[in-house]
Image: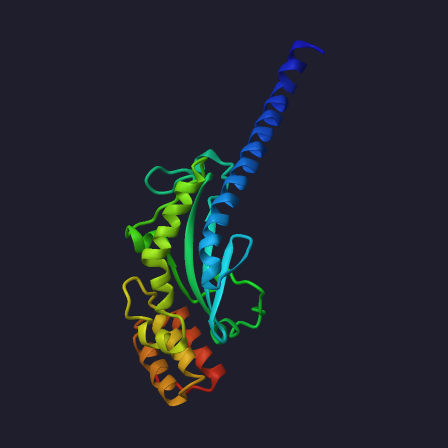
Amino acid sequence: MGFFDFLKNKPELTDEKSNNQNLTNNLELKTHLESIQNEIFLFLKPLGFKKKGRAFNRQTEDGIYQVINIQSGRYEFDDKYVIPGFRENLYGNFTVNLGVMVREIYELDSHNKPKNIYQDYDCQIRERLPHLTIKQDHWWSISDDNNKTAKEVINGLSSHGLDWLDNFENRDKICRNLGNLEGDSPRAKLNVALIEFHRDKSKAEKLFQDYYNKIKIKNGHKEYVKGLADRLGVILKD
């Protein structure tokens, strides 16, 4: 092998070593995260939650599921991805998402099928645990101190997370609270209308109309709401 052949082949050896190192880190991070989530599950299981993967679910009323989901930061291959203060590389970190899934809204999308366990992205009502505890986004580092990290998450769930979820534990509470709590989605009132449609159609029609009227600009969302109302047999006036 000539000198230039050696130089040409050297990056492949470096890349292989780098990939092996990433694999090792991946396995270590996965082990630590599983240890953390197992501690969290020991706290949640007596409260009626079941676990699959990174998600915990509890059904509180027929078709109402409370969801707690552990989201790990993904590995970014491109070093240009990181923009300090704007977009960070979250690999090796995790956060906790909360959500409530309402079956009749979930099933409006024909692609959505019943699941054994739901993820936070299946939910119509969503929040992130640190937004409740410290009023800002936060990702925990996955490290050797698993007990301390798990305890912080459990304390956050005990002090804020479970109370937030229980604001939406049944349809009565959802219709009473959704849209009236800090940080609620602008679409919250539409979700209330969709729930009321199965309980009080005349009330749902009024909620639909009020929501439709508040969409000032005729854009894709306004057309979506009109199409949704048409599907449900709700007549909206322009």
Residue 206: x percent and y percent?
Answer: 34, 85
Q: Nearer the viewer, residue 183 or 80?
A: 183
Q: Quadrant of the C terminus?
A: bottom left
Report the residue at 54% width, 40% height from top: 31
Q: Is residue 187 above or below residue 159?
A: below
Q: Position of residue 163 (x, y in %)?
A: 34, 63
Drawn side of residue 177 relative to residue 102, left or right? left
What residue appears at the point 48 percent right and 53 percent down from the top-left corner? 42
Type of colouring = rainbow
Residue 140 appears in the rendering? no
Q: Position of residue 86 (x, y in %)?
A: 34, 42
* Percent position of residue 112, x then y: 56, 69
Q: Quadrant of residue 212?
A: bottom left
Residue 93 visible in rendering? yes
Q: Residue at x 35, y 70 (%)?
A: 188
Asked whether, in this view, residue 41 is left or right of residue 196, the answer is right
Quadrant holding the N terminus: top right
- In the image, residue 5 above or below residue 18: above
Q: Is residue 116 above or below residue 208?
A: above
What residue is rendered at 46% in x and 34% in y? 79
